[in-house]
Amino acid sequence: MKFENCFTSDLYVLAEEIKRETFELDNINMKPYSFVSPSAYDTAWLAMIEDVGTQTPMFQGCVDWILSNQNVVEGLWGRHQDDNGDETLTSTLACVVALRKWNIGSLHVHKGKRYIERSTERILGKYINSNKKGSCPRWLVLMFTGLVELSQQLGLQFLFSTRVKQMINNLFFQRQEIFHREKLVDGRRYQRQSLLTYLEVLPSTFYAENQEHIVEILGDSDGSLFQSPSATAAVYMLSGNTKCLAYLQSLVQRCSHGVPQIYPLSEELIKLTMVNIMDNYGLGEYFGEEIDRFLLQIYKSHEKEDVEKMPICSKVDQLHKASLEFRMLRMNGYDVMPRSFCWFLNDEEIRDHLETNIGCLFFVMLSVYRATDLIFPGECELEEAREFSRKLLDKSQFIDEQIVPTFHIKHEISTPWMTRLKHLDHRMWIEDKDSNAFSIGKASLISIYSDKLTHLALRNFELRQAIYRHEMEDLMMWVKKSGLNDIGFGREKTTYCYFAASSSTSLPIIAATNIRKLMAKSGILITVADDFFDEEGSFDELEALTKAVIRWEGEELKGYGNIIFKALDDLVKVTAETCLKGHGTDITNNLRNIWSETFESWLREAKWSKKGYIPSMEEYLRNGIISIATHTIVLPTLCLMESCFPEHKLKRGNYDNITTLLMTITRLLNDLQSYQKEQEQGKINSVLLHMKNHRGLEIEDSVACIEKIIDLKRKEFMEHVLRNKFSDLSKPCKDIHMSLCKVFEMFFNKKNRYDSDTEMLEDIKKALYDPINIRK
């Protein structure tokens, strides 16, 4: 593994470089705005401001930024993506206007004009072709028409076809409709999306007619017009307002790399988003200490904000920040209460505001919804918050997809968090071009960006893929050597088992090799043995194998029983030797007892089936939580991880409550997807027993009842994993329990994916083989 060790070392070097340059999260000198995506459009408007009496730009740095940040190949400015270049049209037009105003950058202007001329028809045309009304997004109508007028005043000429000229004329008609339909400031509309926020592209008469109102707004604010740099730049150019000037000077001082669409932004929200990105990218291994210090700092100030007297925009920002804090703190074991963000449920003003403006407050509701993934028993506030946020997110078809892709909503709602495996989630976040976005500006998303962080995430994922493939090859050799691949019956699930073991955890790349292999080998053996008991073995063979496992003596076994026992004996020996070498503890007898208990439970079910015996629900579950064999995977794994794992928690009847809850949930999940098959085979499970014990019920009623039990147990399990008062197990041990639970949730979410030969192939390819594809 020298090759992998070398690459791992390189990644740690890159991580240290990132820490020094950027991610000193607990450093008060950190400059959070240096990570916020700059807006070429807003920067261009600041570049247009004249320094009084000099006929030169007041903010030369903004002009320099424009000259340095054009896409020299395409000639554009702004966020350029394969599927959406709308924002680049207005950004490029604004930058061309700014350079033309100062008669500089003639080559930049020429390239920008060519981009506008060849892109306008494509961008405007897609709305005419896909929209019955032929209407463009409101922001595009207002910005493009206003900039066209300004460019004409500066003598800029564009070579447009007759068709494009007709499209542009249509935009001016749409603008007039907006002017007739909307008030300059609508009390129900989110301020940052009000018509006045677009003052820079409105006819100058709007300022003259509403000057007193605008001055009044400025007097009550930080000198900005609804935190919009471009609109505030326009106010200053029209009025010379000193408060506006102070705001703009502060803005340029803080954002010398190009200004954002909104200023100021919550600096705490920026930092929280950065930490969230690290977690989404799977980089906790590299920034663990820094993240822990930051979360402790956040926890100390948690819930200290007084929201009652805040203006509505500040309440919205606080809700976003508080819900993100709640999720991150609870996920990391901090004891936080739902009231820290669920206060909004009792605030009619903010509820109405959220419902009215869901299109531009998308990320706030998404953060609330994600926070409610972590519900404990009895947390009615979280239940209500989940229902409220989901209801709004379900309105995604009304959201302007040119600004907000609905992928985020669809993924969150269609794929429950408990069914997602970490490794695949990391890939999704790395590949998603909008994964770093945390707010919506006037024309596009506002994102956190760091090329080095993205590069580290990409290389880390690729390294994991390489190591996982290598471990997979080792596993295949073990299966072949043990004879399990030639056994000739049942399900061959080597790839499935390794995929689940590797993709469900974020354990250290190199150090956890033995842990991933142990989890996979255990899963493979359980599948083969379970199939032997269910399908292939005679009762005498099953009894002989079980007795051999209890005695741990298999010399008299023959055929399949002999193959299974030898593979099991090898697994237990290797695991015990590894544990003894690493921790100085001999767990041989403990491992044998765990496996003996599992084989006994399988034999008991075989006896029930042979005799036609119908156990009580209590008797069935007492045996069923053993026969599902999740403890047979998780407990030996914990022994490898922890040098001092409590030995008494390895003994039957003494398992930790977290382990018992895991066993119960996984049994019931399996039963939900197997009752039809088992009914055909004359076997029983919890769904069938429930229907039998409650005459008159339909099978759907029994399914609903078991689903309700799972939901209750899932919340209880979540609380035991995420709160310290219920268990003395370490966080890594609890995380392994959570990972295994998510594996079963994934395999048995709405159908039985584990028994399908094809259902998992696409996910396996993404996890182990397919190159990652980052869309720019």
Image (spheres, helix red, strand yellow):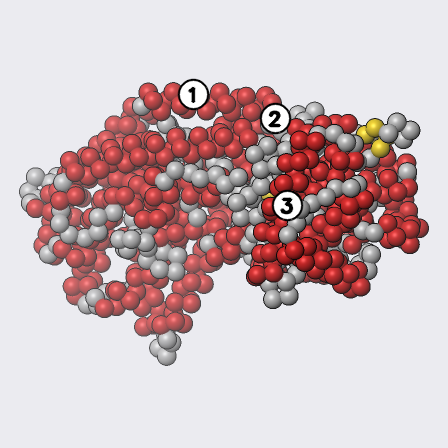
User: Could you tell me if residue 338 is visible in this image?
Assistant: no
Tag 2 residue: 22
Tag 3 residue: 117
C-alpha separation, residue under disc 1 versus residue under disc 3: 49 Å
Position of residue 298 measured from the top left corner of the image (x, y, whole percent): 65, 36
Q: Earlier in the sequence, mark 1 or mark 2?
A: 1
Q: Residue at x 74, y 34 (%)?
A: 99
Q: Dot 2, crowdedness within 10 Å: few (<14), some or many (≥20)?
A: some
Describe the element under mark 2 as helix, strand or loop: loop
Q: Earlier in the sequence, mark 2 or mark 3?
A: 2
C-alpha separation, residue under disc 2 versus residue under disc 3: 39 Å
Q: Nearer the viewer, residue 590 or 184?
A: 184
Q: Dot 3, crowdedness within 10 Å: few (<14), some or many (≥20)?
A: some
Please name the amino acid that badge 3 sits on. Glu
Tag 1 residue: 9
Q: Quadrant of residue 108?
A: top right
Asked if residue 592 is positioned above or below residue 163 in the image, the reply reads above
Q: Earlier in the sequence, mark 1 or mark 3?
A: 1
Describe the element under mark 1 as helix, strand or loop: helix
Q: Residue at x 61, y 26 (%)?
A: 22
Q: Residue at x 87, y 44 (%)?
A: 218
User: Could you tell me if residue 126 is visible in this image?
Assistant: yes
Asked whether, in this view, residue 773 is left or right of residue 575, the answer is right
Please name the amino acid that badge 1 sits on. Ser
